[in-house]
């Protein structure tokens, strides 16, 4: 589980409980994580309206699974949330499933 003392959080295999905790901890809009397991998630870089992050931003990017599946099934959203004092990088998949670069 995520703790209040951490400034850098790297988390794979995010569960809905992890997401709910992060939303509450950092006062995030829950729609940020509408499709955390899906390639229909939208890549974006936007400012975050939060009472707990100063000038926070969200970056949603994608990585690929290391399977030979259609591209729609291989795209995995990676969520990066940060401000001047915090960094969160997370995905619902296991990092070992992603293609090494």
Image (cartoon, grey):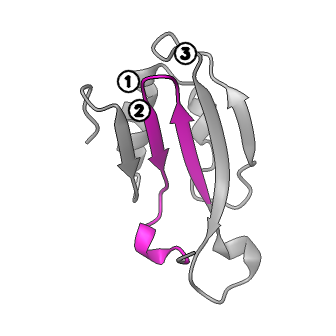
Vertical position of residue 53 compared to residue 65: above or below:
above
Q: Position of residue 58 (x, y in %)?
A: 62, 34
Please, which residue is most extreme toward the bottom here?
68
Q: CA distance from mark 1 to mark 3?
A: 10 Å
> Are the residues tagged 1 and 3 within 8 Å (C-beta)?
no
Q: Secondary structure at mark 3?
A: loop
Q: Is residue 95 magenta?
A: yes
Part of the protein shown in magenta: 77-99
Q: Crowding at label 1, few (<14), some or many (≥20) Cα neighbours within 10 Å? A: some
Q: Position of residue 80 (x, y in %)?
A: 55, 42
Q: Is residue 6 magenta?
A: no
Nearest to N terminus: mark 2 or mark 3: 2
Residue at 53% across / 77% down in the picture?
100
Q: Secondary structure at mark 1?
A: helix
Q: Crowding at label 3, few (<14), some or many (≥20) Cα neighbours within 10 Å? A: some
Nearest to N terminus: mark 1 or mark 3: 1
The residue pinned by badge 2 equals: 22
Q: CA distance from mark 2 to mark 3?
A: 12 Å
Residue closest to the eye, 82 or 50: 82
Q: Crowding at label 2, few (<14), some or many (≥20) Cα neighbours within 10 Å? A: some
Q: Is residue 55 left or right of residue 97?
A: right
The residue pinned by badge 1 equals: 25
The quarter of the displayed image where residue 67 is located:
bottom right
> Are the residues tagged 2 and 1 within 8 Å (C-beta)?
yes
The residue pinned by badge 3 equals: 50
Residue at 42% across / 74% down in the picture?
96
Q: Position of residue 89 (x, y in %)?
A: 48, 46
Residue at 57% across / 75% down in the picture?
101
Residue at 52% across / 31% down in the picture?
82
Vertical position of residue 59 compared to residue 95: above or below:
above
């Amino acid at each position: 589980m995520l703790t209040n003392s951490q400034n850098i959080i790297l988390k794979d295999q995010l569960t809905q409980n992890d997401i709910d905790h992060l939303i509450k901890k950092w006062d995030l809009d829950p729609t940020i994580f509408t499709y955390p397991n899906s390639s229909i998630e939208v890549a974006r870089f936007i400012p975050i309206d939060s009472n707990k992050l100063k000038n926070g931003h969200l970056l949603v990017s994608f990585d690929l699974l290391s399977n030979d599946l259609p591209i729609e099934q291989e795209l995995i959203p990676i969520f990066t949330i940060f401000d001047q004092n915090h960094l969160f990088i997370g995905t619902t998949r296991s990092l070992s499933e992603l293609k090494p670069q």
